[in-house]
Image (cartoon, helix red, strand yellow):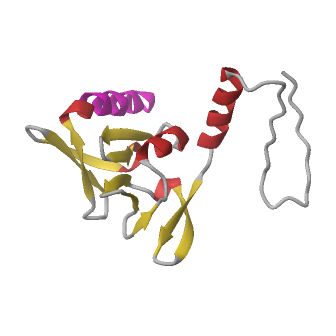
């Protein structure tokens, strides 16, 4: 594989072009990795489009057929389905139920219940529930992250 980097001061933001004789799994994987490196997401509220940092997002959840991005003080529509977000979001985001994805960097507390787990965030009344089916994976990921910092 040949990698070339060209500096073009006229560009407003980085642009990546992949030239390949065929689209194979290696190229598709590279494309997914590059897409995950995105740090902002286009979201909508009323008639306006906003570009918010992924770090500002607490969680995503479906509301009927609409996927909402929740921040400390706002809710935005994404225009994407949860499975599309799962493919695009970095590793700090994790599916916690059939209807929600959480930003693990923003979790403040977990409160275990019989059939679910309440996830709370600092400085906001916002919360979301992890289903029993996804709880074990959530705990494993949080424990992995915690041991990295010890």
Give the quarter of the figure containing the C terminus. top left
72 to the left or right of 47: left
135 to the left or right of 48: left
Identify the residue at horizontal 39%, vertical 39% (top origin).
Answer: 94
**Labels in figure, total:** 0
Foreground of the two, 83 or 129? 83
State whether residue 31 is above or below residue 103. above
Identify the residue at horizontal 36%, vertical 39% (top origin).
Answer: 95
- Quarter residue 12 falls in: bottom right
Position in image of residue 13 (x %, y %): 77, 57
- Specify the principal SS of the magenta part: helix
Q: Residue furthest left?
A: 114
- Quarter residue 63 falls in: bottom left
Identify the residue at horizontal 63%, vertical 34% (top origin).
Answer: 33
Identify the residue at horizontal 86%, vertical 29% (top origin).
Answer: 3
User: In the rendered structure, does residue 148 fall within the stretch colored magenta?
Assistant: yes
State whether residue 55 is above or below residue 23. below
Range of residues picked out in magenta: 136-149
Give the quarter of the figure containing the N terminus. top right
State whether residue 130 is above or below residue 56. above
Foreground of the two, 90 or 79? 79
User: In the rendered structure, does residue 5 fall within the stretch colored magenta?
Assistant: no
State whether residue 149 is above or below residue 10. above
Position in image of residue 81 (x %, y %): 44, 49
């Amino acid at each position: 594989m040949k990698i070339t980097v060209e500096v073009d001061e006229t560009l407003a933001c980085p642009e990546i072009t992949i030239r390949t004789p065929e689209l194979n799994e290696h190229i598709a994987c590279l494309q997914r990795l590059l897409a995950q490196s995105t740090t902002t997401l286009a979201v909508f509220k009323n008639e306006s489009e906003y570009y918010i940092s992924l770090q500002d997002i607490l969680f995503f959840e479906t509301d009927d057929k609409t996927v909402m991005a929740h921040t400390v003080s706002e809710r935005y529509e994404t225009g994407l389905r949860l499975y599309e977000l799962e493919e695009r979001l970095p590793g700090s985001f994790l599916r916690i139920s059939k209807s929600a994805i959480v930003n693990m960097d923003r979790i403040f507390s977990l409160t275990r219940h019989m059939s679910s787990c309440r996830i709370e965030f600092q400085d906001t009344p916002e919360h979301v529930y992890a289903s029993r089916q996804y709880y074990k994976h959530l705990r494993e990921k949080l424990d992995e992250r915690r041991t990295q910092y010890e």
